[in-house]
Image: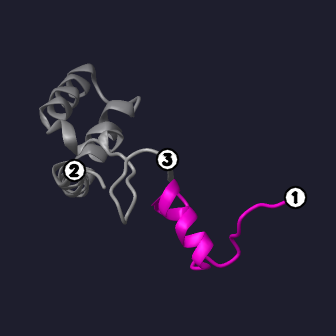
Amino acid sequence: MAKTSMVNRETKRTKLVKRYAARRAKLKEIIRKPTSTPAEREAAVAALQALPRDSSKSRQRKRCSITGRSRGNYRKFGLGRTKLREATMRGDIPGLRKASW
């Protein structure tokens, strides 16, 4: 089980990403657009840097939805490796079973 503070921090980051997503996209579009002037670009870069760091999507970390474990996660299932194995053995995940050859 992950520390509660780490899981809470991750939920806070998720909320920040959602809140600032439109603003960040707009500023990045100004920076990328070839027709924008250097002054506009510079202002957009400054405004982007002024936003909270945790509002960047790349600062998010995938976590197990049950335990909150940050490593060994399967994106497709949203579970950590241990919980995925347990769910597979119980037969909770259709079409997934233990390999045997």
**Quarter of the view holding residue 71:** top left
Q: Is residue 28 visible?
A: yes
Callout 3: few (<14), some (14-19), or many (20+) C-alpha neighbours within 10 Å? few
Residue occupied by mark 2: 3
Left or right? Give the position of 65 relative to 13. Answer: right
Q: Secondary structure at mark 3?
A: loop
The residue pinned by badge 1 equals 101
Q: CA distance from mark 2 to mark 3?
A: 16 Å
- Looking at the image, residue 94 lies above or below residue 11: below
- Asked if the stretch drawn in magenta spans residue 53, the answer is no
The amino acid pointed to by label 3 is Gly
Count of numbered circles in the view? 3
- Nearest to the eye among marks 1 and 2: give it: 1
Identity, as a three-letter code, of the amino acid under mark 2:
Lys
Residue 77 in sight from this viewpoint: no
Earlier in the chain: of badge 2 and badge 3, it is 2
Q: Are marks 1 and 2 in contact (CB under 8 Å)?
A: no
**Marks 2 and 3 close (CB-CB < 8 Å):** no
Quarter in which the C terminus is drawn: bottom right
| Quadrant of the image containing the N terminus | bottom left
Question: What residue lies at 30% left-to-right and 39% top-to-bottom?
Answer: 59
Q: Nearer the viewer, mark 1 or mark 3?
A: 1
- The foreground one among 36 and 86 is 86
Range of residues picked out in magenta? 75-101
Tell me which residue sits at (54%, 71%) in the image.
87
The amino acid type found where label 1 is placed reads Trp
Q: Which residue is mark 3?
A: 72
Tell me the distance, in whole angstroms, between the alpha carbons under discs 1 and 3: 24 Å
Label 1 secondary element: loop
Q: Earlier in the sequence, mark 1 or mark 3?
A: 3
Q: How is the image coloured?
A: one colour
